[in-house]
Structure formats: C-alpha cells, structure tokens
Amino acid sequence: MLGLKLPTDPRWVNIAEKNIEDILIDHAWCEQKAASTAISLIVSFPEYTELVTAMNELVQEEMSHFKMVHDLLKDRNIVLGRDRRDFYVVELIKFFPKGGSREVQLVHRLLYAALIEARSCERFRLLSENLKDEKLRKFYRKLMISEANHYTMFLGFARKYHDEKIVNEKWSELLDYEAKILKSFEKGESVHG
C-alpha cells in the first residue's frame, strides 16, 4: 500500500526497543515537526484553500500526537530534551532541485511530506506488532492509521495540484532515492533512521 521500495529491516524493532527512550523523544519531535510543516504550507501557499483547511486540521492533530507522546515521556520520567537533527529528512530534501514554479515547489514539498508519513506509518506498524510493551503496541497501532491517512492526503494533494503522470514519475524517483538513504543508516535509534 505504501509503495516503499525498501522495507525496514525487522531487526530495527529490536534496536528501537532497546533504545525506547530515544525513540519516544525523537517521535515527539517528529510530531512537532509535522505540525510545523503543515503551518509552513499554510504560510507559503495560502491561495490553496482546500490545502489550508486540511493543514489547519493537521496542525491540531499533530500537536495532539505530540502531547500524547510527551505524556508517555512524562509517565516514564523521561525529559523531552532538545531536538536532534533528523538526518533522514536532511538527506531526503536534497533530492528535488531548488527553485521552479510555485506549483512545482508545492508538489515537491507535498511529496516529501507524503514519504515521511509513509515511512513513519511503516515503522509504527512494526512497533505495533513487535514491541513487548502492550501499551506502546496499542499506541503505535493507533498512530499508524493516522500516518497512513496523512500519507494519502499529501500524495492526493500533489496529484490534484499538478499533472498526475509527472507527479507519479517524481514520486517513483523519490521512492528510489529514499531507499538508498535508508540503506546508508545503521544505528536505527530514531523513528526514520
């Protein structure tokens, strides 16, 4: 369903479970960044009314997810700490060239967002099926469904606002590139890494 070219190595869950504090902290920041991305799309592309409406709803949802993860951290006496650089995203956003028309810039940003949500969905599925902690398994199952919805929403907007054939070509190329990025990561102590 997600179309990812390289599935996550199932052993990633073992690494994640051994480093669950780091995963939860990273996850909290991922939710905050997702909300920030939605705000940025509103600010950058206010003329797309349907997109603005959807992003407004997404900001609220992502911040509620941030609160949920932060509450988990507090329950476990884990301090959120400072944000860490997400090297997966840093590498991912190097794919499309800078510039181009506003429409092309929008499509690129929507495709990046769709892919990040797709990878999160896949990782949350693995956590929901394999973690020993039942509370966390249920938590990640619920969030997995949200991530799938976000992925399809972003991809749907990209296809709506630009030639669908071109968008599908760009999407396929981005998926290939993302697979190469994922191969280069080894530690796995973050949601995407």
Image (spheres, grey):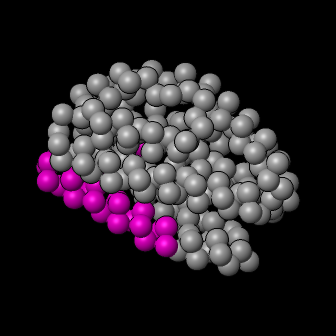
Q: Position of residue 171 (x, y in %)?
A: 71, 42
Asked if residue 75 lies in the magenta stretch, the reply is: yes
| Image x and y of residue 103, in percent | 80, 62
Q: Residue at x 65, y 43 (%)?
A: 93
> Within the image, what quadrant is residue 64 found in?
bottom left
Q: Report the front residue among 189 and 3.
A: 3
Q: Is residue 4 left or right of residue 147?
A: right
Q: For this view, does 123 lie left or right of residue 178?
A: left
| 54 left or right of 140 in image | right
List the single residue furthest toward the front.
Answer: 1
Residue 59 in view, yes or no: yes
Which image quarter is the N terminus in? Answer: top right
Could you say where residue 106 lies in the image, as x and y percent from the top left? 73, 59
What residue lies at 17% left-to-right and 42% top-to-bottom?
A: 134
**Magenta region, residue range:** 57-86
* Picture quadrant where residue 170 is located: top right
Residue shown at the point (74%, 63%) measured from the top left: 160
Q: Residue at x 60, y 29 (%)?
A: 5
Looking at the image, residue 174 sits to the left or right of residue 58; the answer is right
The vertical placement of 55 against 159, above or below, is below
Q: Say whether residue 86 is visible.
A: no
